């Protein structure tokens, strides 16, 4: 018999709203959701869960004794709240990887390395892999585990939403101003109609996560990060190379067997078409598959906010719960 759960969400409004929506659809019997205000919501921003308004509380005033799970999408400066919740027995789902580098905190891509959850009992904290790593491993991880592939090159086209909601607003504002012939302020970093190297997080952080999830792998991974003028939707161009001929059909069969993935044999799915045509589908889309000499190349796209963070975080809590944590 399931226990009725009391769950806390500490995140920006846009992400918190997606988590609440997906919790309504999940297998968890959630009795109550509370918003912990680490990012204050606007006056017009309010969550609803099961047709009821969600209570918002100052995180410093929360009583953790009756809370089972915390969706934590804060920053390093908020880590003390995360630790307080975990020390009180509340299981923390770390969405932004604040604790991902800690040796005794499991780093999980739901549906790929769930067996590593056994380490959760050490701290009551489990970290969700960065959306770039989740997207790569959901698309290629099972084939990488089989051996043969020894070099993987990834170019991640990052949307404004990958940074935060404020970045989305900046991009929208710049786009509107430039379309109306209004120049940007002197010294203002341009986002609209442009692409630049992404420097907020180093690729080294992503490589460390890859190595933590696949500790015995000798695969050489190179990740290029590019900030694009896209609002939502993370796209990756992936090239996987071997010293031997690669069976592309084996990759396609693996994609077809994974319910989280959709392989498009003819259509190329972009962040824009994903948002327009597949908004209600919480899946990762793979297209433009090409056989290379001793390798394969493909293009993958998903909504990194709804799918890679909210959807995978809820799946992670489901797994944690049904494993008895």
Image (spheres, rainbow, N blue to C red):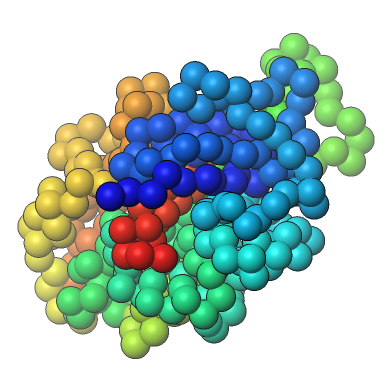
x and y percentages locating residue 158 in the rendered image: 54, 47
Please determine whether, in this image, residue 102 is positioned above or below residue 240: below
Q: Is 147 in front, or is 280? A: 280
Write the residue at 57% across / 52% down.
67
In the rendered structure, the answer to whether residue 78 lies left or right of residue 216 reads right
Write the residue at 33% across / 23% down.
277
x and y percentages locating residue 36 in the rendered image: 69, 44
Q: Is 246 in front, or is 98? A: 98
x and y percentages locating residue 182 in the rendered image: 82, 17
Quarter-wise, where is residue 291 in the image? bottom left
Write the residue at 36% across / 44% down.
28
Residue at far right of view: 186
Quarter the C terminus occupies: bottom left
Write the residue at 72% across / 49% down.
62
- Residue 206 in view (yes/no): no
- Residue 189 in view (yes/no): yes
In the rendered structure, the answer to whether residue 314 lies left or right of residue 266 reads right
Q: Is 284 in front, or is 183? A: 284
Across the whole image, how many numbered discs are drawn on residues?
0
Q: Is 257 in front, or is 136? A: 257
Quarter-wise, where is residue 84 in the image? bottom right
Please determine whether, in this image, residue 84 is positioned above or below residue 237: below
x and y percentages locating residue 141 in the rendered image: 28, 66
Residue at far top of view: 180
């Amino acid at each position: 018999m399931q226990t009725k759960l009391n769950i806390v969400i500490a995140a920006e409004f846009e992400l918190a709203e997606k988590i609440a929506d997906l919790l309504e659809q999940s297998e968890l019997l959630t009795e109550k959701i509370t918003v912990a205000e680490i990012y204050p919501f606007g006056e017009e921003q309010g969550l609803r869960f099961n047709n009821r308004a969600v209570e918002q509380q100052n995180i410093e005033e929360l009583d953790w004794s009756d809370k089972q799970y915390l969706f934590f999408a804060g920053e390093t400066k908020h880590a003390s709240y995360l630790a307080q919740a975990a020390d009180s027995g509340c299981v923390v789902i770390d969405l932004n990887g604040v604790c991902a580098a800690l040796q005794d905190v499991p780093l999980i891509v739901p549906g790929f390395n769930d067996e590593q959850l056994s380490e959760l009992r050490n701290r009551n904290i489990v970290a969700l892999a960065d959306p770039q790593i989740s997207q790569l491993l959901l698309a290629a991880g099972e084939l990488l585990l089989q051996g043969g592939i020894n070099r993987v090159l990834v170019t991640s086209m990052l949307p404004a939403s990958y940074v935060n909601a404020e970045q989305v607003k900046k991009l929208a504002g710049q786009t509107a101003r430039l379309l109306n012939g209004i120049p940007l302020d002197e010294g203002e970093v341009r986002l609209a109609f442009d692409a630049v190297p992404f420097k907020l997080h180093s690729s080294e952080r992503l490589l460390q996560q890859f190595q933590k999830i696949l500790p015995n792998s000798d695969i050489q991974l190179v990740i290029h990060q590019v900030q694009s003028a896209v609002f939502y939707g993370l796209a990756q161009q992936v090239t996987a190379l071997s010293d031997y001929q690669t069976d592309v059909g084996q990759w396609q069969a693996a994609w077809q067997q994974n319910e989280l993935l959709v392989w498009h044999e003819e259509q190329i799915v972009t962040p824009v078409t994903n948002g327009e045509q597949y908004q209600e589908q919480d899946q990762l889309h793979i297209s433009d598959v090409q056989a290379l000499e001793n390798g394969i190349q493909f293009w993958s796209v998903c909504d990194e906010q709804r799918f890679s963070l909210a959807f995978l975080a809820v799946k992670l809590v489901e797994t944690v719960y049904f494993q008895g944590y």
